[in-house]
Each structure stands twice: as C-alpha cells, then as structure tokens.
Amino acid sequence: DQQVKQNSPSLSVQEGRISILNCDYTNSMFDYFLWYKKYPAEGPTFLISISSIKDKNEDGRFTVFLNKSAKHLSLHIVPSQPGDSAVYFCAAEGGSEKLVFGKGTKLTVNP
Amino acid sequence: DVKVTQSSRYLVKRTGEKVFLECVQDMDHENMFWYRQDPGLGLRLIYFSYDVKMKEKGDIPEGYSVSREKKERFSLILESASTNQTSMYLCASSSTGFVQPQHFGDGTRLSIL
C-alpha cells in the first residue's frame, strides 16, 4: 500500500524552462510535506517543505504547491539549471516524526 | 550545519556474517533513523529511535536490529547477512517537534556476497 506516489520515474526539461515534479498521497492524516534532492553517491538533502495549513511555499527558484482536496503536491523549479539534475523524493509526515517517501523522480536538465 | 556521518561509504561482506553500520550526528538530535534505498523502491524505513536506548520498528525491520547507547550514535546490525540485504543504507537525524526535516548522511553501499 503506497501512501506517497510519484508516478513519473523520470522527467527531462531544457535549461531555463520550468520543471514540475508531482506527488500524490492517500493518507489524509499527513500534515507536513517535504521535498528532498539526491545526487548519486550522496545522501538526500532537504529542499523545501510545506505544512497542511498552507497551499504554497516559495524559496528562491523552488516553489511547492499543496492541493489538500486532491491530495496532491507539486514542486516547481524555475528556471531549471543543469545542476538541478538529480533524483527528487517527495515525503509526508503525520505527527509521528516518521517520514513516508515516494519512490522518486529522476530529473534531467539539458543544457 | 548538521553533520551526519556514516562510518563506511562502501562495505563488502559475506553471507552469514554479522555486520555493523555506524552513524554519528553532531547536532544533539533526539531522533535517528535507518533507511535502505533500492532502485524503484525509494527509501524504506528500517528502524528509528527517538531517545537513547529507545527504538521502534519501521516498515522493513526483519533481519535487522539497532542499538542506541549514546544520543549521538545509532548503529544498524545485520544479524546474519544475506544477499537480499545488498543495498544503499542511509542514516538520518532530526530534532523533536513539528516541521523538523531529517538530515541524512552520505550512505553506505553494502554488498553481501
């Protein structure tokens, strides 16, 4: 039973364009959502988060949108840069301090 | 900056061996976690600890145990290593409270032959 789903295993975009990574969840008890970025041979690094009381959070080129009614969140990267090429994991938490991760989306930004 | 250090980047062991993976964090975090990452499966929680000598099972605890004798150190133990435990193992830590992200180490690539 996959509670956090990233349905696109990979995404390819051109440098300078927008990257949109999507994530769906099934558990309505989740109230905090995070995005992590992972380069090969490194651990995941925290990117941005959003609590369920908000519908948008922005940090520089990265914006996360949350649609609670649809149980959907997305990460927008504008403009995309080649250094953004990595695997992006969506994660959710519901008060237990444990995170439930999606399977990841590999983003490739082409120069 | 939070520093989570895993003792080995690469490790090769034999089937049946007892394997210890060590993790140390320097930010006085209460919570520590062990995950494994496999292609197509994402990050799966093995065990976590919210205090010294406390532990809770995650989603895939079978074949593993953990030890937390000091706040900064969390060890993962493979009691009798098997080939299906070949994986990337990731340790993480976080402080207690709402909206505290987990911080990860660089991982240990473990191969069981």
Image (cartoon, coloured by chain):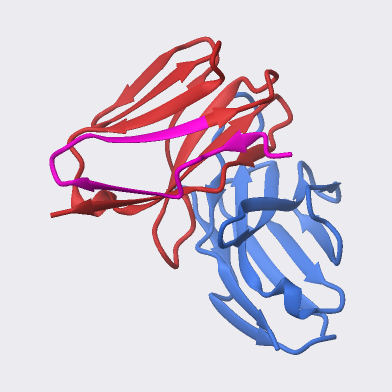
Magenta-colored stretch includes residue A16: yes
Q: Is residue B97 above or below residue A38?
A: above
- B44 sits left or right of B102 in the view: right
Quarter location, residue A13:
top left
Count of labels in the image: 0
Image coordinates for residue A76, horizontal then vertical, percent: 31, 30
Magenta-tinted stretch = A1-23
Image coordinates for residue A19, horizontal then vertical, percent: 27, 37
- B33 sits left or right of A64 in the view: right
Could you tell me if residue A42 is visible in this image?
Answer: yes
Quadrant into which the C terminus of chain A falls: bottom left
- A47 sits left or right of A58 in the view: right
Q: Nearer the viewer, residue B49 or A33?
A: A33
Q: Colour of chain B?
A: blue
Image coordinates for residue A33, horizontal then vertical, percent: 54, 28
Q: Nearer the viewer, residue B62 or A13?
A: A13
Magenta-colored stretch includes residue A44: no
Image coordinates for residue A18, horizontal then vertical, percent: 22, 34
Q: Is residue B12 above or below residue A25?
A: below
Q: Which chain is red?
A: A
Name the residue rendered at 66%, 26% in the picture. Answer: A26
Name the residue rendered at 68%, 48% in the picture. Answer: B32
Quadrant into which the N terminus of chain A falls: top right
Q: Is residue A103 above or below residue A61?
A: below
Could you tell me if residue B99 is visible in this image?
Answer: no
Quarter location, residue A61:
top left
Name the residue rendered at 55%, 15% in the picture. Answer: A52
Name the residue rendered at 74%, 74% in the picture. Answer: B84
